[in-house]
Image: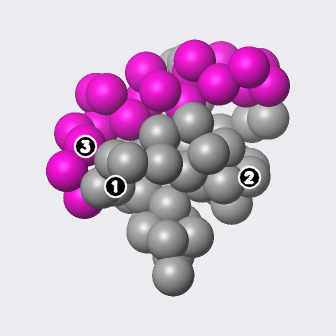
Amino acid sequence: MLWTDINDIAVELLEAHPDVDPLAINFVDLRAWVMALPEFEDDPNHCGEKILEAIQAAWIEELD
């Protein structure tokens, strides 16, 4: 997975952290959780706030 795989990352985060409210996590922790996903292979430096916001929004959508 790459940073651009927003929806795949959101699904994986939901499965890895089912009891977490995505609005309650800060971007530092969110970035670390994404990088800790087993299939994540992208450069940590290719991530910015807009990508993290998109991941958070997709994660929220997955809750519905």
Q: Residue at x 48, y 48 (%)?
A: 18
Residue 16: quadrant of the picture? top right
Residues shaded magenta? 23-43
Q: Position of residue 14 (x, y in %)?
A: 55, 51
Q: Amino acid at mark 1?
A: Pro
Rounded to the nearest whole Å, what is the CA distance between mark 3 and mark 2? Answer: 18 Å
Task: Look at mark 2 in the image and give the residue it sits on.
Answer: 8
User: Secondary structure under badge 1?
Assistant: helix
Residue 29: quadrant of the picture? top left
User: Secondary structure under badge 3?
Assistant: loop
**Is 21 or 19 nearer to us in this picture?**
19
Q: Which of the labelled discs sits on residue 25, or is there none?
A: 3
Q: Position of residue 28 (x, y in %)?
A: 28, 27
Q: Is residue 18 left or right of residue 21?
A: right
Rounded to the nearest whole Å, what is the CA distance between mark 1 and mark 2? Answer: 15 Å
Q: Position of residue 56 (x, y in %)?
A: 42, 57
Q: Residues within 10 Å of mark 2 (few under 14, many from 20)?
A: some
Q: Amino acid at mark 2?
A: Asp
Q: Is residue 26 left or right of residue 54?
A: left
Q: Please name the colour scheme applied to the rendered image.
A: one colour
Q: Residue at x 66, y 54 (%)?
A: 11
Residue 28 visible, this angle = yes
Q: Residue at x 57, y 18 (%)?
A: 36
User: Secondary structure under badge 2?
Assistant: helix
- Whether the residues at callouts 1 and 2 have beta carbons within 8 Å, the answer is no
Task: Look at mark 1 in the image and give the residue it sits on.
Answer: 22
Q: Residues within 10 Å of mark 3 (few under 14, many from 20)?
A: few
Residue 51 visible, this angle = no
Residue 2 colored magenta? no
> For the N terminus, which image quadrant?
top right
Q: Position of residue 21 (x, y in %)?
A: 30, 55
- Whether the residues at callouts 1 and 3 have beta carbons within 8 Å, the answer is yes
